[in-house]
Amino acid sequence: MRSCREPPPPLLLLLLLLPHTLTLDVRARTAPLGLASPLPPRRAPPPRAFEGEVAAEIRVSAPQALAFAAYDDVERMPEWAPLLERVRFLDRAARRSEWSVRLPAALFSLAVRCGFGSLVCWQAVHAVEAPRVLAWRSLSGFENEGEVRFEPEGGDGAATRVSLKMVYRLPDFTAPVVQNALVRRFMHFTVRRAMERFRDVVEREAAAAVDERAAAEAEAEATHV
């Protein structure tokens, strides 16, 4: 397993990395969320930095609590964000985690040699207002922050609207690449695809929970006959 402590990719890596990080979300310009566990202060931006923002939303046919719980367990992120190699909690109680990007070995080595290791591995912390909001902020490496909101849809609570917003900051020289129309389409497609994967995972779990509950009720009825 590659370590985030390895030395810090050129623009090619940015094309691979940005879409993945965009599966998360937050907005630097939004008002404070008033979460019980506030996020730490933002890091001072570099003298010349490019700031970008991405947003997306999707309807999930699953209860709000179930959708939120799946997202809150950040170690599960690679299930729906395939460009993530691993997410692991460093301190589960403090919700501090370490993230690493899935890259071919040759490209990972190139990133190390070019001094961009902080873009392939970083630490982050997230705070929650269960089961409605999850917000995060990076603590090291690739600078990003965002929030995901989970709002019940319909009167029966069987569906949830999941909305994601994210702000990221990169060195100023990356702006021409990130703002390229082809790259932006790729980024938004990747974000959307990750959310669709999340929806599919959660909906399968919701259906399985319904089946288990129905089986348990049928068994209980049978024992009382």
Image: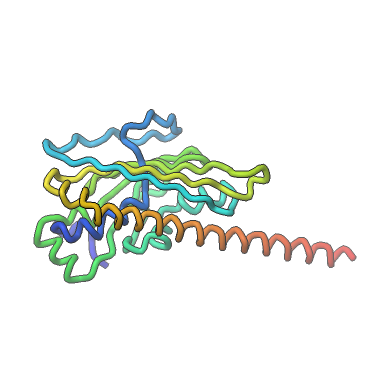
Identify the residue shown where x is 17% and y is 71%: 106
User: What's the coloring here?
Assistant: rainbow
Q: In this orientation, does residue 136 appear?
A: no
Which quadrant of the figure has residue 182? bottom left
Quarter of the C terminus within the rendering: bottom right
Residue 90 image position (x, y, % from top left): 34, 52
Identify the residue shown where x is 17% and y is 61%: 12
Query: Is 193 situated left or right of 160 in this image?
Result: left
Q: Residue furthest front?
A: 181
Residue 56 image position (x, y, % from top left): 41, 47
Query: Is 95 situated left or right of 18 in this image?
Result: right
Identify the residue shown where x is 9% and y is 59%: 114
Residue 113 image position (x, y, % from top left): 9, 62
| Of the pair 58 and 110, the residue shown nearer to us | 58
Q: Is residue 46 above or below residue 2?
A: above
| Of the pair 96 and 209, the residue shown nearer to us | 209
Numbered circles on residues, count: 0
Which quadrant of the figure has residue 171? top left
Identify the residue shown where x is 83% and y is 63%: 221
Residue 176 image position (x, y, % from top left): 15, 49
Query: Is 42 situated left or right of 204 in this image?
Result: left
Q: Is residue 86 above or below residue 93?
A: below
Q: In this orientation, does residue 211 appear?
A: yes
Quarter of the N terminus within the rendering: bottom left
